[in-house]
Amino acid sequence: MYKGTFLIKDNRLFFPATNRNRKCIGDLLSTIPLKGGSILEIGSGSGEHAVVFQKRFPEILWQSSDPLLIHRNSIAAWIDYEGLNFKMPQPIDINVENIPWIIPSKVKESLHIIISINMIHIACWNCTKSLFRESSKLLKNGQFLILYGPFKIGNKHTSQSNNLFDKSLKMQNKLWGIRNLEEVSNEAIKNSFVQEKLCQMPANNFSVIYRKVSK
Ligand SMILES: C[S@@+](CC[C@H](N)C(=O)[O-])C[C@H]1O[C@@H](n2cnc3c(N)ncnc32)[C@H](O)[C@@H]1O
């Protein structure tokens, strides 16, 4: 599990970072016209973001996902706790590397954004590749794939704390680590995405909005 990240209450997990970044990520989402449709979240973790964003953007359908059962149980418990059972779909089991992703048809047909928060540095590089490949198949031109998390820029860490964080990730798993934005964006280009917007976020994080374009 993730160092120092949660306390358990019933099945609900608490990831402290979600408290710190939910407002700024929500503010970023609010800059994108969200007139209905669905958003697929990859690597939803505890589910705290999912319920907060579903409540903040009631016009959309927030589809959470995670490969870990303990996380899916937490997401389901948060949905129940927040009284969102009649509004939100239950979390689905998506491991980005297992393709094709199985998504309910209601979500797939109305999908216009895929978002992944703090996932790609806690997974192998192939997960980033797979995320872009599969997102490209699911999204139509003009739709968005949004990533949030720490990145290296020009192969350099943007802070000393990110440098230390990167080292601690690699000690946990040598395939993990903070990704270089240019390499991530190369994967985007290979899969028909352009970098629409790069936003500096608090605590040395970035949000990157990629827009699907035609080949
Ligand atoms: C640091 S947690 C972030 C969770 C949540 N997005 C947040 O910001 O609190 C990373 C998440 O990525 C998920 N994850 C790891 N490998 C994955 C993979 N191959 N496919 C999809 N999700 C994955 C983990 O299960 C975990 O929930």
Image (spheres, grey):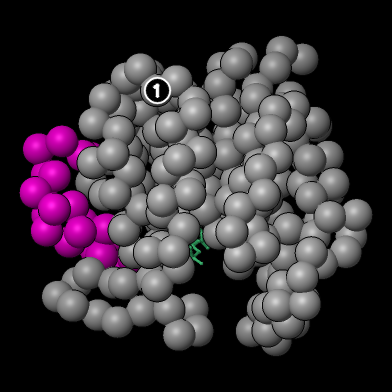
80 drawn magenta? yes
| SS category of the residue bearing label 1 | loop
Amino acid type, mark 1: Leu
Residue 168 visible somewhere in the drawing: yes
Give the prevailing secondary structure in the magenta stretch.
Answer: helix
Please state the extent of the stretch shown in magenta in the rendering.
69-89
Q: Residue at point 90% right, 54% down?
A: 154
In percent of width and height, residue 18 lies at: 41, 62
In the image, residue 140 sits, relative to residue 49, either above or below, namely above
Residue 174 visible somewhere in the drawing: no
In percent of width and height, residue 180 lies at: 81, 56
Instruction: Describe residue 3's horizontal placement relative to residue 48 as left or right.
Output: right
140 drawn magenta? no
In the image, residue 169 sits, relative to residue 98, either above or below, namely below
Q: Which quadrant holds the C terminus? A: top right
Most foreground residue, 128 or 207: 207
Reading the image, the residue beneath label 1 is 34
Q: Residue at point 46% right, 35% down?
A: 29
In percent of width and height, residue 80 lies at: 12, 54
In the image, residue 138 sits, relative to residue 187, either above or below, namely above
Q: Residue at point 45% right, 20% down?
A: 33
Most foreground residue, 93 or 1: 1
In percent of width and height, residue 93 lies at: 37, 52
Most foreground residue, 207 or 193: 207
Instruction: Describe residue 36's horizontal placement relative to residue 100 as left or right.
Output: left
Instruction: Describe residue 64's horizontal placement relative to residue 145 as left or right.
Output: left
Residue neighbourhood size for the residue with mark 1, other residues' Cα within 10 Å, grouped as few (<14), some (14–19), many (≥20)? some
